[in-house]
Amino acid sequence: MPFRNCIVEYYHKITNGEIVAGKWILLIYEIIVRGLEKGEFVFSAKKANKAIKFVENFCHHCEGREDLLKLELWQKACLSVIFGIVDEDGLRIFREVFIVIGRKNGKTLFASAIIAYMAYLDGEYGAKIYCLAPKLEQANIVYDNFFQMIKKEPELGDISKKRRSDIYIEDFNTVIKPLAFNAKKSDGFNPHLVVNDEVASWRGDPGLKQYEVMKSALGARRQPLILSISTAGYENDGIYDELMKRSTAFLKGNSKERRLLPFLYMIDDVERWNDIEELKKANPNMGVSVFPDFFREEIAIAEGSLSKRAEFLTKYCNIKQNSSVAWLDYQTVENAGAAVTLEDLRNSYAVGGIDLSQTTDLTAATVIIEKGGELYAFTQFFMPENRVESAQAADGVPYDIFIKKGIVTLSGENYVDYNDVYKWFVMLREKYDLFILKIGYDRYSAQYLVNALEEYGFQTDDVFQGENLAPVIREFEGIIKDGNFKIADNNLLKAHFLNVALKHNMETRKFRPVKIEQRARIDGFVSVIDAMTVRQKYYGEIGEMLKNEG
């Protein structure tokens, strides 16, 4: 009998409406299925079904019942992707797995089953498997669940010895151990598998550092795995947010990552948070481990309390109070590229924007010109000469190439000389006859630059950064998605657009732009939005001129 392909089966049931799934789940399976069709991945049905069969034949429930697990199709598809998508050498493609799923959907049990498979049947002699959490008490949840799971199966329990601080499988020289945060002492670990439990509760910097330490430690193994599994939470700017931004960027096609595998079970429409059909998107085990009547009762409570509603959105919809997701998809930004020059648009009215950047090693200035109903953005970047090499290494961006192309101007030695920004705007006026009616800048900009611009005759206005930009960004999103915003031959500006995530505040229904990851740059985007802000603010006064129809 041929092996079953649960990936394709699950995908087809989603696309034909038989199974309700959210946009992020649809996207990951589209990526996998298309990758298989194009030959970008190899699917080993044997490896996939080996993992499924092991779980269903050896892994037991351990709370309320003790029979063997019966996997649902979504779980089989997930295991098939993790263990069945391989390279030409038969090694697993994906090394970072991020599963976001609503409470009561069996995530701890599922994580324990993955531990069991990788401990007993993955073929890694001397494997080191860690259950990681900020405190040992939390790390013990998955660890104890795993032990109870295998203890009920004699074939596994008989060869497993529970010691004071770990579980040892002598036949394979394998150790399973719970770990609390200690980034300084984690460097010597050589993990085959790391299970990060409830990463949404991991606090900011300590969680980020611990994750990176464990991730970097994976390098010595042939096909290691770091599995992060969580319901949404309340911590901001931690590893959960970081993984969410990276994941959504990857799913939108804005990332070159190859080893990241996100399964984001979340609702799509926040306004439908109390709709059972919408809730299925965040709760794929609805009807199995959690039932519609449970949600109806919780909805009734949440409808009468704002705090309970926020909790419901977080725990059962996977929409956290301040959620961060990638903004524009790659194709939208790529389609915005245009082979147009300042010479083509000389003698025009325009608006400008400036972002001086708090780090002082990259500054962006933009001018936006409307012609024929389309907006054209010209952006110039400025970087100090002595910072090019370090910035290139830190950012992973070929600034030397952009300098040669004239997109980046060398300015100052260790800090950008803001006089060069002033000269750029003056050059636009004197060389290309651009009449820049308003220049937007953030209020942290150098006052002497603002004074110099105003003394020349430019009108400036400060732009307060944050959630108040939401109306401008919303308008801009419509313009670029409709194909009416053009980026004038500037791949660095395109990259900055792709580095933007929107951090949503569910209380205010507003959002603010943030970086997709710490080292990403969005300075060019900010300068564009500063220009778009003054354009929107003063359009009643200068809009007719900005159309450049005369």
Image (tube, rainbow, N blue to C red):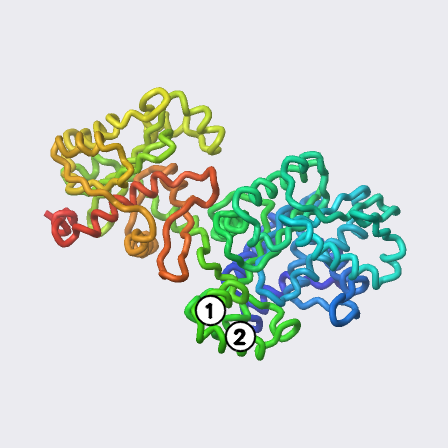
Q: Secondary structure at mark 1?
A: helix
Q: Which mark is residue 309?
A: 1
- Return the x and y of residue 225 as percentages of the image width and height: 67, 47
Q: Position of residue 318 (x, y in %)?
A: 52, 62
Q: Residues within 10 Å of mark 1 (few under 14, many from 20)?
A: some
Q: In the figure, 547 relative to 402: above or below?
A: below
- The reply to whether residue 300 is visible in this rendering is yes
User: In this view of the protein, which residue sits in the foreground, 279 or 380?
Assistant: 279
Between the residue at mark 2 and the residue at mark 1, the CA separation in whole angstroms equals 9 Å
Residue pointed to by mark 2: 298
Q: Seen from this angle, which residue lies furthest left?
A: 550
Element marked by disc 2: helix
Disc 2 or 1, which lies upstream in sequence? 2
Query: Is there any visible trace of residue 86 in the rendered image?
Result: no
**202 displayed left or right of 376:** right
Mark 2 closeness class: few <14, some 14–19, many ≥20 residues within 10 Å = some
292 horizontally vs 492: left or right: right
Residue type, mark 1 in image: Arg
Q: Amino acid at mark 2?
A: Glu
Residue 442: image location, x then y, percent: 27, 41
User: On screen, 83 above or below 455?
Assistant: below
Q: Nearer the viewer, residue 431 or 448?
A: 448
Q: Is residue 272 above or below residue 367?
A: below
Badge number at residue 484: none
**Residue sitting at x 37%, y 55%:** 511
The x, y position of residue 5, in whole percent, is: 68, 62
